[in-house]
Image (cartoon, rainbow, N blue to C red):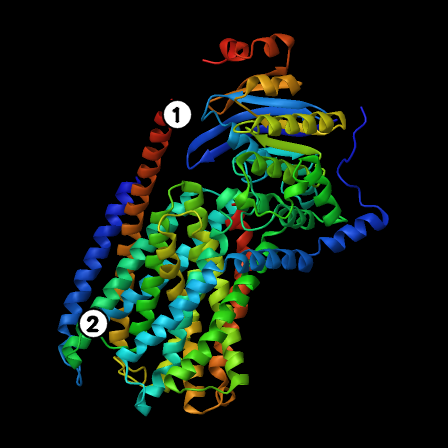
Amino acid sequence: MAVANETPVAAGKGAAAERRRSSFARLVFVILAKDLRAELRTKEAVNASLAFAVVILVLFNFAFDLDDPATRMIVGGLLWLVFAFAGTLVLNRSFARELPNDCLDALVAAPVSGAALFLGKALANYVLVLAVELVSLPVFGIFYNVWFPFGQMLIVLSLGTWGITVIGTVFSALTVNIRLREVMLPMLTYPMLVPALMAAMVMTADLAAGTSIWNQMTWLKVLVGFDVLYTAAALALVETVLVG
Amino acid sequence: MREKILYGLGVVALLLLARNIYVIAGFPPEAAQGAIFKIIFFHVPAAMTGMVAGTVAMIASVLFLVTKNFKYDALAVAVTEVGLAFLAANLVTGSLWGRVIWGIWWTWDARLTSALVCWLLYAGYLMLRHAIEEPTQRATFAAVFSIFAFLDIPIVIMSIRWFRTQHPGPVFFSSTGSFPHDWTMVMMWNWLALLMLGTVMTMIRLRQEETQREIDYVRRMAHAL
Amino acid sequence: MTAVTVDGVWKFYGDYPALRDVRLDADAGACLALIGRNGAGKTTLLRTIAGFSKPGKGAIRIFGQEPRETETRRNIGVIGHGIAVYDELSAYENLTLYARLYGLADPRRAALEWLEQTGLERVRDGLVREFSRGMRQRLAVARAFLHNPSVLLLDEPFTALDDRAIAVLQRLLREALANGKTVIMSTHQLREALELSTHVALLNRGAVAFHGACTAEMVADPGWVYARYGD
């Protein structure tokens, strides 16, 4: 009996081209593009996140007297609370968007490694959360007349947001099937993020006070260390979470 | 046989505790803080026992992921619960201490803050377990979370300590203060007593987990018929 | 040659065995119909063969390899209970996505070809959430066949299909079998399935109660296997 299309035997150009097409980076990009396209078509999570951020920023005005220069000290902390809460709205959707129609099964069945799937989704989340933050920053500046040196602030934003994204994306996978997912995700994520949020808050407060983040490298190191450690842990363990 | 070991261990632990309390009561009150200072003999070992529990939980989680044997999952949850209890004891004794010394129920002392964050981390572990019904998925996801939590502990402790050096706050017990050698010995004995107690509690909880799994098994079998 | 081997597989949920010592195989070109009551373990078995979960004991071999091997995954097509396509994307976007995930040489051409095969070429740019039930099912079929897999694992594929979709699926399955592909399909629609099947396996509470060739007797009276080997 003629048997077409057996297990592909690696031979010659065909296999090499296929390996390029299925390279890790290429697959990460495919997943990233898919998540971004799906989100930007509906814009549900991003809009909710942005609206939430703006509302909280308005509410701060009633809680604190931010004209008082002493309260400018707490500015760094406030901003990262806003980013953490608004970010969770985006991160919640991350694996949850794969649930309708059992899309997650199809992704797991595809010849894509768990690490590629995770990284693609994490990067998509990163882009979305960063976008919300970059829009919130000028809003914050306008409301409270607090402006940050852009270059250094971008560094703190990038590193802090990556920490939030990595943990949030992994935990989005951990909580995808459980009851009360929207509540569980923040409750699990925030304690784990304490060091990263603390570092980001301190550095942002320093920037608001006019000092440079380069003066005190400790917090930068904490943030970088946190990001590296948890990216590695996530890449190592995500396959277990997806397939078990 | 196992029962006898458990009882024996429990009795020894309680006797050791009783003896320690007697010795501690005999110590003179500390110069600066008075009698309340003696709470340190329970406050510190409770935290140390909690840390040991977290380490055992991480090891059990890794072993579960590698072997898929549910006894490691049972160990992980049992030891985490016991560790949470000891951490809570640390927080409560710390709060009492602060109340007596400074008149307030809570201070953001570096160690106390770290203990609180660790408590929240592991409380999250229990919440996650509670929310997943299917046993294999529950064990797997909880194991991954436990590993993540364990990795966080050193970072949490260090970063909170740095924060407190930049923004100084109250400190219960500075390490530069002198702590007499024989007091250190009693603290260690107390730690041993608490470790033994913790082991007994873990084993009782383990027994409970096994029974629960048997019940679940029988229930599923019944549903299948 | 043997395409799929299920060798002494046990699957546990906690301590409860959902699959008990399942031994089956399917050759290239064979179509195995998995039948059994609800809760017998058909879905669990298909998901274990597909590699969604690992067996507690025993092994699955697909062309001699583990199901989770990357090359093996390239060769498996799955239709589960959900259609596994994204509502927010168009039919064309969905198929090109999967074509890229499977590393196909020309994702666009493959997507267009399979849109034609399933009669969806006119709605290629329509968003899936606007599709009718039958159209969604046909897209699911296109997704499963897109990368030309050697092994097709289908979980109750005929359930809730409209007539047109049933015809499409039967045609595609006949062509696939003629090309030497292997099909394992669980089903309650005994008549449609047994017409295509070469072999039948009956699962009862996680164990194989019957496994053998599909006879004319079975096609004529689909309940025969249940009556003889079920309980």
In this rendering, the count of numbered labels is: 2
For mark 2, what is the residue? B95
Q: Secondary structure at mark 1?
A: helix
Residue plotted at (61% across, 30% down): C165
| Residue nearer the viewer, B183 or A25 | A25
Name the residue rendered at 37%, 78% in the picture: A77
Q: Residue furthest front?
A: C122
* CA neighbours of label 1 inside 10 A, class few (<14), some (14 to 19), many (20+): few
Q: Is residue B150 in view from this perspective?
A: no
Q: Using the rendered view, name the quadrant where residue B122 is placed.
A: bottom left
Horizontal placement of C219 versus B72: left or right?
right
In this view, the mark in front (1 or 2): 1
Residue at horizontal 49 percent and vertical 9 percent from the top: C227
Q: Position of residue C150 (x, y in %)?
A: 71, 34
Q: Chain of mark 1?
A: B
- Lower position in the chain sequence, tag 1 or tag 2: 2
Residue where numbered disc 1 is placed: B224
Q: Nearer the viewer, residue C129 or C40?
A: C129
Residue C119 seen: yes
Discs 1 and 2 share one subunit: yes
Above or below — where is A146 with respect to B61?
below
Image location (x, y in percent) of residue B168: 32, 86
Residue C165 position (above or below residue B58): above
Percent from the top left, x then y, of residue A141? 42, 83
Residue B79 is situated, as x and y percent measured from the top left of the image, at 34, 53
Cα–Cα span, label 1 and label 2: 51 Å
Chain letter, disc 2 residue: B
**Residue drawn at (35%, 25%) of the image:** B222
- Quarter location, residue C116: top right
The residue closer to the viewer here, C171 or B192, is C171
Please state, as top left, top right, bottom left or bottom right, where the N terminus of chain A lies in the image: top right
Q: Amino acid at mark 2?
A: Ser
